């Protein structure tokens, strides 16, 4: 069996190397969002994988397909792919396709061998340091929460950080500071984020470009004391009657909660979507939580609200996530990715205002906590604090 496995691994490695025939190492890659804005990111190529790096995050793209001269790389957590052709050993060109946004959502992609810094500038002179906390307001026209907490770490002209909101974060951002301007970007297979800002003492005036069409003005002021609302206080329980709901499982069978299967168990109900990066960060954490506490009585039920056309497509996307991340807990289909639909299904809450939203239920069947949104690993100490708090809560509920 070991010889067969080693043979398969060797054959896969040889096939990979023969198909790509590209220079191994660090590459400078770009997404051409529009006629004016290019989103840079770091691409890593070795003998068996492509990887994308955003600050401390590395995303391996191990699933690749070939058709004629085109190579396709699938993202592990999202329904999207990079398709490219080899120009020569040091250059590739193609496009990124996000299937969740429709069959025609494609953004031109290119990469060349060699990487020095994320954003290039003729002058590396840096006269500003924006490390610290910033109170930020995005000029959204819709109902989204506009206030954010910008948290940045700068070393010389290198910059990392993210924006936290009441419902989630902007994940791992990386970039540079040049003179009185800074630039940040993130590309993870779902997000394609580009930020630019002008620095004037303790204020920032910037532009946020998201994907092909999103563009918002934003501004910030240095404020080390600024805090966002407590995510455990935003969504509230308005009906203290026994917690119950009815939905379908991935095969279309009716699932009614509570059931004997979850009697005397601590249960987390996760309202999520496979298209949602913050949901995926939370799902990875829940996988660890489940592995650590399932034997002691923890259960997790994830309910997917999906993009697509009907139950079969919704179920297919959830099954794909379950398979790719090897997720052992229970999955249900909520329906279309609409917060008002989730609010209807969970009418005991004042409102579901965010994907994800999580409901923590004790062994007695009562709701112990409702957590809105998710600020993940890209937020550094904020995520570690959340993780510690949640682990402690689960341990306490399991002892009751």
Image (spheres, rainbow, N blue to C red):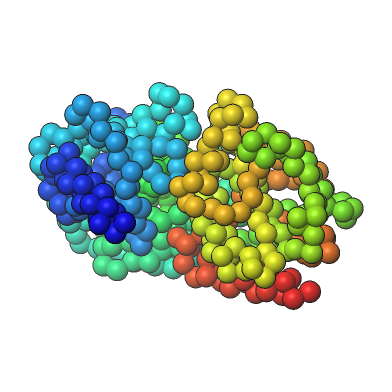
* Position of residue 90 measured from the top left corner of the image (x, y, whole percent): 11, 43
Number of numbered markers:
0
Picture quadrant of residue 162 = bottom left
Position of the C terminus, as image quadrant, is bottom right
Q: Residue at x 29, y 36 (%)?
A: 65
Q: Residue at x 47, y 51 (%)?
A: 325
Position of the N terminus, as image quadrant, is bottom left
Is residue 343 visible in the rendered structure shown here?
Answer: no
Q: Seen in the image, is 379 located left or right of residue 123?
A: right
* Position of residue 114 measured from the top left corner of the image (x, y, whole percent): 14, 51
Q: Nearer the viewer, residue 107 or 142?
A: 107
Q: Residue at x 47, y 62 (%)?
A: 377
* Position of residue 32 measured from the top left corner of the image (x, y, whole percent): 29, 35
Residue 3 lies, with reference to residue 212, above or below; the image says below
* Position of residue 319 measured from the top left corner of the image (x, y, whole percent): 54, 41
Q: Residue at x 28, y 62 (%)?
A: 158
Q: Nearer the viewer, residue 26 or 332?
A: 332
Q: Residue furthest right?
A: 241
Q: Seen in the image, is 133 located left or right of residue 142?
A: left
Q: Seen in the image, is 47 located left or right of residue 298?
A: left
Q: Nearer the viewer, residue 340 or 305?
A: 305
Is residue 324 visible in the rendered structure shown here?
Answer: yes
Picture quadrant of residue 369 = bottom right
Residue 335 lies, with reference to residue 130, above or below; the image says above
Q: Nearer the viewer, residue 90 or 394?
A: 394
Residue 221 lies, with reference to residue 42, above or below; the image says below
């Amino acid at each position: 069996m070991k010889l067969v496995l080693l043979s398969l691994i060797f054959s896969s490695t040889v096939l990979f190397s023969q198909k790509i025939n590209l220079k191994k190492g660090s590459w400078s890659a770009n997404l051409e969002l529009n006629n004016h804005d290019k989103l840079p990111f770091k691409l890593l190529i070795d003998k068996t994988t492509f990887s994308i790096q955003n600050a401390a995050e590395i995303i391996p793209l191990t699933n690749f397909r070939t058709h004629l001269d085109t190579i396709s790389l699938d993202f592990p957590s999202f329904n999207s792919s990079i398709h490219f052709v080899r120009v020569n050993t040091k250059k590739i060109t193609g496009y990124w396709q996000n299937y969740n946004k429709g069959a025609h959502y494609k953004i031109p992609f290119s990469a060349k061998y060699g990487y020095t810094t994320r954003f290039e500038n003729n002058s590396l002179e840096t006269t500003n340091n924006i490390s610290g906390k910033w109170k930020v307001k995005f000029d959204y026209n819709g109902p989204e929460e506009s206030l954010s907490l910008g948290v940045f770490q700068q070393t010389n002209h290198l910059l990392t950080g993210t924006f936290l909101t009441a419902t989630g974060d902007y994940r791992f951002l990386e970039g540079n500071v040049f003179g009185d301007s800074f630039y940040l970007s993130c590309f993870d297979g779902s997000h394609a984020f580009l930020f630019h800002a002008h620095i004037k003492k303790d204020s920032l005036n910037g532009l946020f470009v998201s994907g092909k069409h999103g563009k918002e003005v934003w501004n910030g002021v240095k404020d080390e004391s600024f805090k966002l609302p407590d995510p455990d206080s935003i969504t509230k329980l308005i009906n203290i009657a026994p917690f119950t709901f009815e939905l379908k499982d991935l095969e279309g069978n009716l699932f009614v909660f509570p059931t004997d299967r979850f009697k005397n168990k601590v249960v987390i109900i996760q309202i999520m979507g496979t298209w949602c990066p913050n949901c995926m960060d939370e799902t990875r954490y829940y996988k660890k939580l489940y592995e650590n506490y399932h034997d002691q009585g923890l259960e997790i039920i994830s309910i997917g609200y999906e993009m697509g056309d009907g139950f079969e497509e919704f179920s297919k996307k959830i099954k794909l996530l379950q398979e790719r991340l090897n997720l052992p807990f229970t999955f249900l289909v909520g329906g279309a990715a609409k917060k008002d639909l989730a609010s209807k299904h969970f009418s005991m809450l004042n409102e579901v205002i965010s994907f994800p939203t999580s409901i923590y239920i004790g062994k007695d069947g009562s709701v112990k906590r409702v957590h809105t949104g998710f600020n993940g690993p890209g937020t550094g100490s904020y995520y570690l604090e959340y993780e510690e708090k949640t682990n402690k809560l689960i341990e306490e509920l399991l002892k009751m």
